[in-house]
Image (cartoon, grey):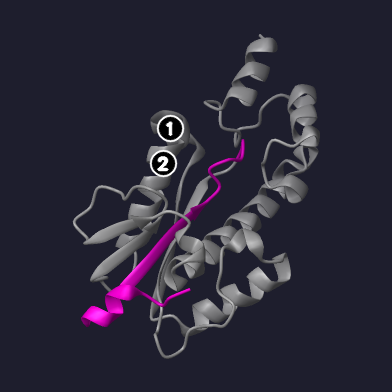
Amino acid sequence: MRYCEQSENGLLSIAGVDEAGRGPLAGSVVAAAVILDSQRIPEGLRDSKKLSKSRREQLAREIKNTALCFAIAEASVAEIDRINILQASLLAMQRAVENLTQQPEFVYVDGNRCPSWNYPSRAVIKGDDAIQAIAAASILAKVHRDQALLSLHEQYPQYGFAQHKGYPTAAHLQALREFGASPVHRRSYAPVREILNCSK
C-alpha cells in the first residue's frame, strides 16, 4: 500500500475519503476524510472490513492523534430516502471534505466515482486497500458508524442494532416483521418497503 503517488509530485495535502453504511437497512451513511502526516502514519492501515473491531478502534485513535486533520460527516435516513443511497454517500463525502480544517490539494475517493466538487480528485476502486489515506478514512467512518448504531440500539433495542449494525440479517428482518419499521429505518430499501406494504 502506498502513502500517495501524488506526494511524488510535490503535493503535501492529500485527503483520502471513504464511506460506511451503504448496505444497512437503518441509520445514516457516514463518510470520513483524512489528511495523513507522511511522517506519522499508523502501522497496519487497511480496509476497515478486514480488521478486527478492537484493531479498528485502536487505529481510529491513532489516526485521530497523528493525522494533520480529519472530519466525519453523515447523510441522514431522510436524505437517503429522498435522493438514494449513492447520492447520499457522495453528499456525506462532500461534507466530510468540506469540514476539513486544511484544504486538500488532491482527494482520493474510494470507489468508482467522485462527488461533484472543485477539488482535483480521483476515484480508486478498492482504494481502502491501496492508498493509506483512504484506508484511514474507511476506519474512521466504520468506527463512527458502529458507535452510532450502538446508540440507536439503546433507543430501539428490539431490532438488535448492536449485533448486526443495521444490516439485513435474518434476525433483523424478523424484528422488522414483528415490530414494523422504526423512524431510523430506510423506507426506500426494498426489505423495509415490502414489510411496510404488507402491514397496510
Which mark identifies residue 88?
2
- Which residue is nearer to you in this view: 173 or 134? 134
User: Mark 1 sits on what residue?
Assistant: 84
Instruction: Name which quarter of the figure residue 23 lies in.
Output: top right
Residue type, numbered disc 2:
Ala
Image location of residue 28, percent across then percent down: 53, 45
Image location of residue 101, percent across then percent down: 32, 73
Image label count = 2
User: Residue drawn at (23%, 71%), measured in percent from left and top?
Assistant: 105
User: Residue drawn at (39%, 66%), measured in percent from left and top?
Assistant: 16
Residue type, numbered disc 1:
Asn
Per the image, label 2 sits on a secondary structure element best described as helix
Can residue 176 be spotted in the picture?
yes
User: Residue drawn at (53%, 43%), measured in percent from left and top?
Assistant: 22
Can residue 11 be spotted in the picture?
no
Q: Which residues are magenta?
A: 1-26
- Density class for disc 2 (Cα within 10 Å; few <14, some 14-19, many ≥20) is many
Per the image, label 1 sits on a secondary structure element best described as loop
Check the picture and name the quadrant holding the C terminus: top right
